[in-house]
Amino acid sequence: MEDIAKQLSFGVRAIGSPGHEKTAAYIEQELAKLSLPTQRQSWTEVTGEAILPLANVVGRFAPENPRRVIVGTHYDSIVRAYRDREHPDAPMPGANNSASGVAVLLETARVLSQSFVRPAVGVDFVFFDGEEGPVSLGEGDPHWVPLGSPYFANNLAGLYGRGKPSEAVIFDMVCYEKLKLQPEPASLTGARAQVQEFWRIGSELAPTVFSTTPTQSPIYDDHLPLNQAGIPSFLVIGFEYEPWYNTTRDTLDKCSTASLEAVGRTLTRYLYQVGKAGR
């Protein structure tokens, strides 16, 4: 919750905003406290008349381990609360839609770094930029496409040489106090065994949060470019977030420590289980 509050203190975190750079720097600062090797994967995206400076931030836990798993989220947020009926041009805080995934990754990195027993896999914590698209409006942009995850997927060799991570799990919107997590259809297509194992663990730890009934429609997010690159990848998202979704009311009071704990504990146990399974 403190990580979420810190990000909210930066204000708007859309591409090119001061809050955007402050968020990337905060992620690097927190990873540095854990002595995790960290790098920025920087590039510029030319979209229409705009030249966008973007940077994925990658922190590597146990970098010497050749067996790698990606744990990802996005750290950019939308530029304005376009779904807010009263204030569509006001800033969108992004407590759930943006800050919550960053918080889960940072806390997981802390837990792994402080553990006496490490998982048998190395973990790459990947904070994707530009998930909300070139005009930073997410679904509010009819031409929306994510930017950071396709770039990452197209430049795997820079991090992994000729190899690839064994799998990836992506988090988005995971702090809502009424969080309900359902398997997502595209994830089941690309990483069915991984989804089933993650939900098995989650259902044991937090049965009120995890439902095995899939969402009705696929959700396009940062897992799809990774799947297309040959990395079995799945999405963990609490997409039911009305009436707060992308409004001025996506604020810290909608978040719950219990929801964050359910997601974080499931992820941690899953990473240890992946190592045991030898995938």
Image: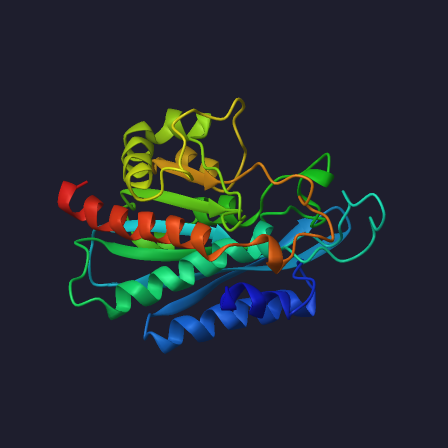
Q: Residue at x 47, y 38 (%)?
A: 225
Q: Residue 28's x, y, as percent?
A: 46, 71
Of 235 and 168, nearer the camera is 235
Q: Residue 148's x, y, as percent?
A: 53, 50
**How many numbered circles does the render carry?**
0
Q: Residue furthest top?
A: 216
Q: Residue 87's x, y, as percent?
A: 84, 51
Instruction: Examine the rendered structure and indicate whether residue 84 appears above or below residue 91.
Output: above
Seen in the image, is 88 located left or right of residue 96? right
- Asked which quadrant contains residue 120, the reply is bottom left
Q: Residue at x 37, y 77 (%)?
A: 33
- Asked which quadrant contains residue 11, the reply is bottom right
Q: Residue furthest right?
A: 86
Of 254 and 118, nearer the camera is 254
Is residue 107 among the parts visible in the rendering? yes
Of 230 and 127, nearer the camera is 127
Colour mode? rainbow
Q: Residue at x 68, y 48 (%)?
A: 134
Q: Residue 65's x, y, as percent?
A: 19, 58
In the rendered view of the protein, which quadrant contains the C terminus?
Answer: top left
Of 141 and 2, nearer the camera is 2
Is residue 128 among the parts visible in the rendering? no
Instruction: Examine the rendered structure and indicate whether residue 79 appears above or below residue 23.
Output: above
Seen in the image, is 104 located left or right of residue 48? left
Q: Residue at x 39, y 71 (%)?
A: 31
Seen in the image, is 220 located left or right of residue 36? right
